[in-house]
Image (cartoon, rainbow, N blue to C red):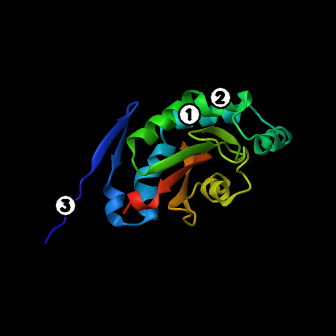
Amino acid sequence: MKKSIAILTVVVLGTVFAIGSALAAGHFEALAKNELAPIGHNKYIVKYTKEKNSQGETMEEINRIDTLWKAEEGVADYMKPYLEGPCARYLKEVRSLVPYIQEIFVMDNQGALVCETDKTGDYMQGDEDKWIKSFADGKGGIFVDEPEDNVVQISVPVMDNGMAIGAITFGVFTDKVK
């Protein structure tokens, strides 16, 4: 008996995503490679990441913002560009079209936030495996974290001309991928 696989094609701002092929494979590595990694090559994600990298933010500045970010219970004005700017709007559009995505956030070449769909607990992700293993010293890699509360974080590189220039993490509902 043959099983048929339904593949949903989604077009977001000129980029085509085939949603469904990795779901049939039943594992997150295939999902990361086949469906999520192409988002890290998307011209808009690359553009916003390059713009952030070109700002030349120092580690001192990143750590200062990170300290403020962690202490803030709500959303302060300085956080709004990360949550409401054009990059965040693009991520929210992707999330709205892909039912298994809970959250998305993009990090630059130092692990600092570029944009996000939802406020993260910290601004600096560069000391966490999600950035370290997906940025992989500019080579790029895939990192699948351990599931927690029915969500697994899957991180892939933001790639430009064969080099990782940042990373993107997706919170994926484990029960919607099966």
Residue 81 horizontal/vertical position (percent): 65, 28
Mark found first going from the N terminus, 2 or 3: 3
Residue located beneath label 1 in the image = 88
Mark found first going from the N terminus, 1 or 3: 3
- Residue 35 lies, with reference to residue 23, above or below; the image says above
Residue located beneath label 3 in the image = 4
- Residue 44 lies, with reference to residue 73, above or below; the image says above
Mark found first going from the N terminus, 2 or 1: 2
In screen coordinates, is 117 left or right of 3? right
Residue 116 horizontal/vertical position (percent): 59, 39
- Give how far apart the Cα atoms at labels 1 and 3 are: 35 Å
Q: At 56% across and 39% down in the image, what residue appears?
A: 117
Residue 8 horizontal/vertical position (percent): 28, 46
Q: Residue furthest bottom?
A: 1
- Secondary structure of the residue carrying tag 3 is loop
Residue located beneath label 2 in the image = 81
**Residue type of the residue flagged with mark 3:** Ser
**Residue type of the residue flagged with mark 2:** Pro
| Quarter residue 112 falls in | top right
- Give how far apart the Cα atoms at labels 2 and 1 are: 8 Å
- Give how far apart the Cα atoms at labels 2 and 3 are: 43 Å
Q: At 73% across and 41% down in the image, what residue appears?
A: 73
Location of the N terminus (image quadrant): bottom left
- Secondary structure of the residue carrying tag 2 is helix
